[in-house]
Image (tube, rainbow, N blue to C red):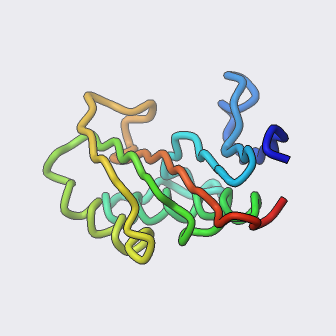
Amino acid sequence: MVGMRERVFSESPFERRYGFCRAIRVGNRIEVSGTAPIPQDGSPVPASAFDQMVLCGEIANEALTRLGGSLSDVVRTRVYITESSDQDEIGRGHKQVFGAASPAATMIVVAALLDPSWKVEIEVEAHLQSGAGS
């Protein structure tokens, strides 16, 4: 049904505290919330901008998969970065994760992200092919 909403949650402590989910599916559309490079196993945030971007993509992909989507369904990404000098490394990571889909993409330099160790945070939009999933 087009109006039904399906949500997935991650280990982020902010989801319940601030009232949001990792991703939501409505019909054939999936929206993935701002996704930071937070390893689920509790290990430290990767040091390199490239590795952080790839980790953000992996986390977003997990949410997409849980909602019946995949990276090939991604039509838009928004990439928030804290240092313009990291753009090439982050862009290379973006290509590694999303290159096959070639989504519309925006990269925005921001003053800071919630955690000073984060160099990148992403948002992802996906549209599943008609008839896919529920």
Front residue of this view, candidates 98 and 56 = 98
Which residue is located at x 44 percent, y 47 percent? Answer: 122
Which quadrant is the C terminus positioned in? bottom right
In the displayed structure, 99 sits above or below 39; it is below
**Left/right of residue 121 with respect to residue 65 in the rendered view:** left
Question: How many numbered circles does the render carry?
Answer: 0
**Left/right of residue 112 with respect to residue 31 in the rendered view:** left
In the displayed structure, 32 sits above or below 67; it is above
Front residue of this view, candidates 104 and 35 = 104
Residue reaching furthest top?
18
Residue 12, picture quadrant: top right
**Left/right of residue 44 with respect to residue 49 in the rendered view:** right
Which residue is located at x 20 percent, y 55 percent? Answer: 87
Residue 78 in picture, x, y percent from top left = 39, 46
Residue reaching furthest left?
85
Residue 119 in picture, x, y percent from top left = 33, 46
Which residue is located at x 64 percent, y 50 percent? Answer: 30
In the displayed structure, 104 sits above or below 117; it is below
**Left/right of residue 112 with respect to residue 130 in the rendered view:** left
Residue 73 in picture, x, y percent from top left = 56, 65
Residue 72, picture quadrant: bottom right
Which residue is located at x 38 percent, y 43 percent? Answer: 117
Residue 2 in picture, x, y percent from top left = 79, 44
